[in-house]
Each structure stands twice: as C-alpha cells, then as structure tokens.
Amino acid sequence: MVYLQLDLQYFAADEKTEKATPKKRQDTRKKGQVPKSQDVNTGFLLLLVFGVLYLTGGFMKETMTGMYEHAFTDYLYMDLTEERTASVFLEMTTEAAKVVAPVMGIAILAGLASNLLQVGVMFTSEPLKMDLKRLDPIKGAKRIFSARALVELLKSLLKISVIGIISFSVIWYYKDEMMLMSQKNVDAALAFFGTTTVIMGLVSALALLLLSVLDYTYQRYDHEKNIRMSKKDVKDEQKNIEGDPQIKAKIKEKQRQMAASRMMSEVPKADVIITNPTHYAIAIKYDEAQSSAPIVIAKGVDVLAMKIKEVAKANGVPAVENRPLARSLYQHAELDQPIDEQFYKAVAEVLAYVYQLEKKM
C-alpha cells in the first residue's frame, strides 16, 4: 500500500500540469519553438499578391503584349548575331522583371509582415542544426499517426473544400459572360479572365485568413500544452536559477569562515577589545593618519567572541568590559568602517583608559 502511494505521488509530480515559466518560454523561443500558423502567411500572401495584380493588371497586360508584339515585329527580322542575341535577352529580361518585380516585392513583404505579426523579431539557428532523432522511424510513425497529424489532415480538407466552393461559386456567377467570350476580342477576353481570377483569389485569401484565426488559436493551444511543466520541473528550474539551498548554505558557511579568519588576522593590530564578558567582543583600532574616528576591525558573538579575546590576549591587546557599549557596537557598527558619532564619547573614554594603562606600564 505504501509503495502504491509513493508511485502515485511520483506520477503526480511528473504530470505536466503547470503552465510554462517565463524562463521555459524564453528557452523554447531560442530553439525556434513558437506558436505559428502557416495559414496566416498564406492568407496574407494571397491577399496582397492578388491586390497587386488587381492594381497593376493593366500595366502587366500592356507590358506582356508589348513584348510579344515587339518580338514578332522587330526581333523576327533581325540578323542573328552574338551581340544582338545578348541585347535581346537583356531587353526581354528587363521587361519581364518589370512585370514580376511588384509581385515578388509584395510577396516578400507579406511573408515578413505575417511572421512579425505572429512571432515578432527572432533570430535562431537551432532549427537548422542536424538532429539524428528526426531520422528515427518509430518517432516518425508516431508523428504520422498522432492527433496533430489528424488535425492537420482535417484542416487541409477544410481548406480545399472552402477554396473549391469559392472557386466554383465565382465561375458559376460569371458563367453567362464566360460563354460569350468566344465572340469577344483578345483584349476583352484577357480583361475578363484576369478580373475573374483576381476576384476568385481575393475571396479565397479572405476565407483563408478567417480560417487562419482558428488555426492560430489551435497552434497556441497546442504550443502551450507541449511546453507545460511538471511540479518537479518547476522546482528544478527554481533551484537552477537560485542555486541549490545546500550548496548556497555551504558557500555562506565558507564565506563566514573566511571572514572570521580575516578578522582574526586583524585582531593583533587593535588598540582595545571591548567585551561583554561572555557574549560580545569588539576590536577597536584608532589611527589618526587613516581615519578621524576609531574603526571596528573585528567583532563577534559567543564562540567567535571567545576566539577574538584569545587572540587578543596572546598578542597583548588589552580588553575592557563595557556591556552596553559592546552590545550596541556589535549591532550598529560595520566592519572596517568608522564608528557612528553616538559612540565617540564612550569609545574615547575606553581608549583614554587604555592609553593611561599603557603609560603607567
């Protein structure tokens, strides 16, 4: 029964029920793991590209037809030489670039804008690093038959269905005019099919953007679920940030030992040790060349106070008993710092007493 209870506690501690901490979110972001919907990119791209086609369609048609006319009226009768071939190639490339450049430029801007909107500014090389775990066939099969793969399949079917319905609806709406295109000239036919295609693209892009809102919501939910942490993970992370309490305690103990050792080396330089016979010991040094007020060079309580008094006795440093002053100096005076003005008179009396003893001796 006891083993069963321990097992249940172990599984409860390992169950990922806690929200990701800011540090965990930052670490996953550095690895390139962020919530992102590809449908947002596609929707933005299609919307802006078809918008550019709608605005610059006339210019594109004039440029393309001008290229064909020029090719069949001028280039056809030119002598084929190396220089003329290079000139024709350069001219045609320039005209084609004029047509393609607006579309390519807006496509790049759409890709950047959609990524910035979802992810923000992020530079990481982690996704590009080689990971042999990705070649694991077992994990690959798990990904293929996972719940996420099923969701992606349903999303794809939904997108295909929506775009198919929109395309069919637009064609059906313009079917009568389409049937009459055989009686129109080339310019009218190109204008009609271009307009129909742009309308079809814009409506499809808007539909994809609406679907991308649902997809982005799902991606955020899935990302949050994947980066959840167990209570043990949270505790371990806290330990890593703040340090293991046992190690911190050992470091503090070592620091105390080093400070005590340094104080012991300063005690022989003191002018007097002010004591509360059994509990407190304060080592005072006064040097007019270094400071205008006496300085506390060592202080301690109980065991440390006994050590200070032992070192002082071994080095001939006098000790004076003054219980209230010793207690107050221990509480308010800082090591290697001049004492406060409130202690000037009391400490001066002690030093005067010590100096009198030294003169008599």
Image: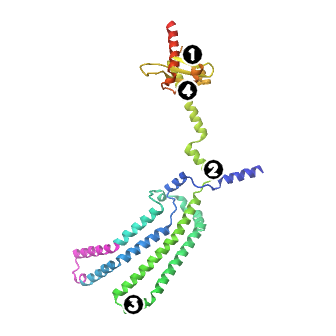
Q: Check disc 2 and report the residue beneath it.
A: 232
Could you tell which of marks 2 and 4 lies nearer the N-terminus? Answer: 2
* Circle 3 crowding by C-alpha within 10 Å: few under 14, some 14–19, many from 20: some
Q: For the image shown, how many numbered marks are present on the structure?
A: 4
User: What range of the chain is rendered magenta?
Assistant: 74-100
Which mark's residue is nearer the viewer, 2 or 3? 3
Q: Check disc 1 and report the residue beneath it.
A: 320
Q: Check disc 3 and report the residue beneath it.
A: 181
Q: Is residue 118 magenta?
A: no
Q: Which kind of residue does numbered mark 4 sit on? A: Ala
Please, which residue is most extreme toward the right here? 1
Q: Check disc 4 and report the residue beneath it.
A: 260
CA distance for labels 1 and 2:
56 Å
The quarter of the picture where residue 199 lies is bottom left
Rendered residue at 47%/83% (across/down): 170
Please state the horizontal and vertical placement of residue 213, each as a whole percent of the image.
52, 68
User: Do the CB atoms of the residues marked 3 and 1 lie less than 8 Å apart?
Assistant: no
Could you tell which of marks 1 and 4 lies nearer the N-terminus? Answer: 4
Q: Which kind of residue does numbered mark 3 sit on? A: Met
Query: Magenta residues: mostly which secondary structure?
Result: helix
* Circle 2 crowding by C-alpha within 10 Å: few under 14, some 14–19, many from 20: some
Q: Which kind of residue does numbered mark 2 sit on? A: Lys
Please state the horizontal and vertical placement of residue 164, each as a whole percent of the image.
51, 80
User: Do the CB atoms of the residues marked 1 and 4 lie less than 8 Å apart?
Assistant: no
